Each structure stands twice: as C-alpha cells, then as structure tokens.
C-alpha cells in the first residue's frame, strides 16, 4: 500500500500540507486502511504512520451545520434542493453500505468517522434524491445512491472500491413494478469504471462530499486543495482554490441562523476548476448542484457553509444557486 499526501496551497515559506493518506491502488481489493488528515509545517512529505485524528491534528475545522436549502431560478423555472449532513455511528454506516454490484469483489469499508450527505431536489415537476457516504478524514467516497422518482423512475448505485467504481442502474420493468422499491425492480445492468492510470493514489470523492470538505478546510491557513472526483461515469481532477473575497448579503433567515445583522459579509470566493484525464469522455463533465464545468462558490468565512454557487446549467446558461435556509446542530 502507498499513501499520497494532498498539498495545501499558499501557506508561505513553510508551506503546510494537509496530508490525506489513501490506500494505494492494489490489484487485489483488501479493506481500506485508515487515512490521515494532519497539518505539518514542512514541504517534505509527511509520514502516514500516525493515527488518523482530524480533531487532534487541527487540520480540519469542525462542521456543525446539519441542514440547508438552496434555490435556483432562471426565467420562469425554479429548483430547490434540501440538504442533510450528518455523522454516522460505525454500525449504522456499515449497515447502510450495499454489496458491491457486478464482478466487484469488495467495496471500500468505513474506517473511523463516516458521514452521509443527502439531497432531495425538485425541478420542473421532477424529483430526485441522492445519498453519499464518505470518510470524514479526506472525503473519499464509499457509496453514492441516486434515485429519480416519478414516471421515468430509476435508481443508480455507485459503490467505490480499490482501483475503480462498481455501478448498477435499475428501473421498473413493468407498470406493476413502479409501485415497488428499487431493490425489487428487475430491469437493469452493472458496469465497472476503472480509475485512469494517472489517477492512482489521488483521493477519489463524489462531488457531494465537497460540501463537507469545503466547510472543514482551514481557509485561514491555506488557499485550496486538489483531489479527484467521480461524476456519473467519469473521473476528473479538481482544484478548489481561494481567489479572494466578495461582499455578500445572506438572505434574512440565513443571516439570522449565522448570527449576522443586516450588514453584508466578506464571503470567501472559491473556484472549482475541473480537468479531464487523458482518454476520458469529454462529454462527461464535473457536476455539482446541477451546474456543469467550472464553478465559483461563495463560502461563509466562519462556518464554511456554501452560500452561493455560480455556473452553467445545461441548456439554460449561467445560473446562481443560493442558500436560503440553514440549520445547525
């Protein structure tokens, strides 16, 4: 097993590292080993032999928001997304992970703190839900389950494993099956999406885990990070970089929840810039909150919660997705 540190940018002469130690990409599929997230004050690669402890290392900030609602409007169309973020006890996390589909031998297992983030989105009469389980130390994903509800219902399972992602898509085969839950749908297929050779050792996360990572990252000590994301059926390398600040006025309910008055705040500007690996399908773009490609975000400097997303929505052009409600534990 090899482990790869993830560099934090812009910490001055003694540039720090946020060390996100991942298991190497072995041919066999043993259970994933513990990861480490810590800050060191040297350019040299840090040893991963220490016990993983985000809180003791001080590398990551505590994330104490638990619910959020976002709204996007374009012309006469409106979309809303409810978000729920929560840590899971180890027994509950293990119980919620499904078997690896297809010819996958074994999916990644939870080690240490596991969190889940869920989305419930509605747009032009369609409803979709999604839940992602991920490791809190580095965001590497364990499982993603997406479901579309309604007449064109389907369910997708992405089970993350060593060297790739196992995928299963299922849908009702008959009218009578539409009233059943996805495990009882009989139409479907499985696939295996292997990692690109030059992605070996790179932390692979589902875009949803970025909500947590962006909130937990110590923006007061670093200017960003890089990792690999898996969106739909393709891998991308993603850079999250702080580019400045912007005066932003949170909505009334959000301002009250954040303990702010009527005055605007200096929100952090963070750009998400994705690049494809050689040989990847160029039509498969990085996607977050329905926005495709490069995205600019505004973050609350105190809690790290995303206040706004700006990017392009397929067929609708530029769109802003804005936080309109947030709840804390």
Image (cartoon, rainbow, N blue to C red):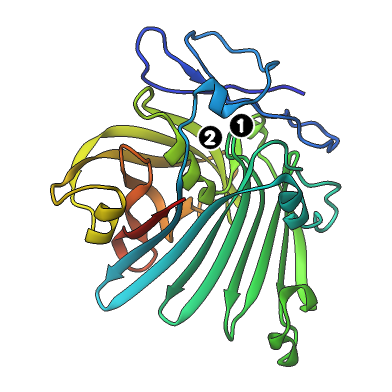
Q: Is residue 194 left or right of residue 299?
A: right
Alpha carbon distance from label 1 to label 2: 6 Å
Residue 99 against residue 90 in the figure, above or below = below
Residue 14 lies in quadrant: top left
The image shows residue 150, relative to residue 196, as above or below, that is below
Of the residues under marks 1 and 2, which one precedes in the sequence? 1
Which residue corresponds to the image point at 73% horizontal and 83% vertical from the top-left? 180
Q: Position of residue 239 (x, y in %)?
A: 44, 35
Q: Position of residue 53 (x, y in %)?
A: 61, 26
Q: Residue at x 36, y 68 (%)?
A: 315
Mark 2, residue position: 227
In depth, the one of 200 and 257 nearer the eye is 257
Q: Which mark is residue 202?
A: 1
Q: Residue lying farthest left?
A: 263
Marks 1 and 2 in Cβ contact (< 8 Å): yes
x and y percentages locating residue 142 in the rendered image: 68, 47
């Amino acid at each position: 097993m090899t482990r790869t540190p993830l560099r934090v940018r812009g910490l001055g002469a003694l540039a720090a590292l946020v060390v996100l130690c991942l298991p190497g990409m072995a041919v066999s599929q043993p259970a994933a080993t513990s990861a480490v997230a810590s800050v060191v004050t040297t350019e040299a690669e840090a040893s991963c032999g220490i016990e993983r402890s985000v809180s003791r290392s001080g590398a990551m900030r505590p994330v104490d928001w638990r619910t959020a609602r976002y709204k996007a409007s374009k012309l006469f169309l409106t979309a809303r997304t409810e978000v729920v973020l929560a840590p899971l006890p180890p027994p509950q996390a293990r119980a919620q992970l499904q078997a690896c589909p297809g010819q996958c031998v074994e999916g990644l297992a939870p080690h240490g703190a596991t969190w889940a983030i869920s989305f419930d989105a509605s747009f032009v009469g369609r409803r979709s839900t999604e839940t992602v389980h991920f490791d809190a130390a580095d965001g590497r994903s364990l499982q993603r389950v997406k479901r579309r509800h309604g007449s064109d219902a389907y369910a997708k399972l992405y089970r993350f494993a060593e060297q790739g992602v196992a995928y299963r898509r299922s849908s009702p085969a008959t009218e009578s099956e539409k009233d059943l839950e996805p495990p009882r749908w009989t139409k479907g297929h499985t696939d295996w999406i292997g990692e690109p050779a030059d992605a070996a050792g790179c932390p692979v996360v589902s875009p949803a885990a970025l909500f947590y990572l962006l909130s937990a990252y110590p923006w007061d000590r670093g200017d960003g990070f890089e990792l690999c994301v898996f969106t739909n059926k393709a891998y991308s390398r993603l850079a999250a970089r702080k580019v400045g600040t912007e005066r932003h006025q949170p909505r009334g309910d959000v301002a009250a929840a954040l303990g702010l008055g009527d005055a605007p705040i200096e929100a952090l500007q963070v750009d998400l810039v994705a690049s494809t690996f050689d040989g990847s399908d160029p039509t498969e773009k990085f996607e977050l909150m329905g926005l495709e490609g490069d995205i600019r975000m505004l973050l609350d400097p105190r809690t790290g919660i995303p206040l706004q997303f700006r990017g392009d929505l397929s067929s609708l052009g530029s769109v802003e997705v804005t936080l309109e409600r947030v709840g804390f534990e």
